[in-house]
Image (tube, grey):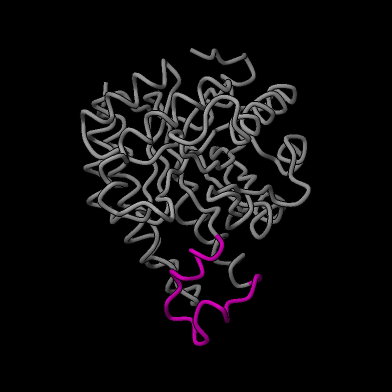
Amino acid sequence: MNSLTTLERRGMSAISTPGGHMLIVAADQRNGMKAAMTDAPGGATGISTAELAHAKADLVTYLANNAPAILLDPEVALPAIVDQGVLGRNTALVVGMDASGFETIDGLRYTRYVDGVTPRRVRELGGDVAKMLFYTRPDRQGPDSLVADQIRELVKACAAEGLLLIVELLTYRLEDESDEDYRAAFGTLVADGAKLAVECGSKVLKLQYPGSAQACQAVHEAAAGVPWAVLSAGVDHETFIDQVAVAMANGASGAMAGRSLWKDSLSISAETRQDYLTNRALPRLRELNAVIDAAN
């Protein structure tokens, strides 16, 4: 197990429920959040950065301020949401360091940092915790791979800043791989990705649901005592609740929920957003909290 420092323990406590489980509302999406605002007259491409920033602020006000933590981006949401007093004093801030999209090198995906965002910049933005996404294919990438080097470097840089880092991993289908082969390998890829990240020093993981109770147990074994939270990956709330219950019963330490909470609760209208976030998304967050804290 990669042990947490005292400062990292404080960060872990800040993103956890009173029951000691991670619960973070994910709202660092840019294009995905625009796409959820289906009533915008000009469509997603017609939504301005300012309009998206207002939507993110409302999401914090009516939803995330009721959670232990919110994950936000430094391109649209920050630092305004902190500077304008939108973020509640009891809700921790997780700053996403990854830029939208990815680049492909030799058939493998790599994420990029948002320009200028370093562990020190995360602190300057008011962040309690950092998050970085890495795409992984552990069947093609071992401890000496580029992605492994990238994880190790960021783990060290965040540790030097006294900053807890959540390492998010996404596996994906290769261009020459059939859907059938990818589905068959998916659970193993998630578990082996977790193993690789832990070997590179990761102390907290954000992972895809691997598909079953048995697969969750394999992930938990691979994580070797490092806490891991399951991400919602855009599934509907009911599906995610079931996934979280299975994951929590088989080793997970919490959940990070984005679109499963708010994908049908955003609007170009501020009045409609307030209604939907309060009456649709917030009850889902409370149900998710109950499921997480019901776990041992």
Q: Is residue 282 above or below residue 38?
A: above
Q: Is residue 241 left or right of residue 131?
A: left
Snapshot quadrant of residue 192: top left
Q: How many marks?
A: 0
Q: Residue at x 65, y 54 (%)?
A: 81
Q: Nearer the viewer, residue 281 or 111?
A: 111
Q: Nearer the viewer, residue 184 or 276?
A: 184
Snapshot quadrant of residue 160: top right
- Indicate the position of residue 138 as horizontal and vertical percent values: 46, 33
Q: Residue at x 45, y 42 (%)?
A: 67
- Indicate the position of residue 189 as horizontal and vertical percent values: 37, 36
Check residue 99 for magenta coloring.
no
Q: Is residue 118 above or below residue 12?
A: below
Q: Residue furthest bottom?
A: 41
Q: Is residue 185 above or below residue 259?
A: above
- Indicate the position of residue 101 as horizontal and vertical percent values: 57, 58
Look at the image and give the residue range highlighted in magenta. 30-50
Check residue 44 for magenta coloring.
yes
Q: Nearer the viewer, residue 282 or 173?
A: 173
Q: Residue at x 60, y 72 (%)?
A: 51
Q: Is residue 6 left or right of residue 1?
A: right
Q: Residue at x 62, y 43 (%)?
A: 95
- Can you say which quadrant of the picture contains the C terminus? top left
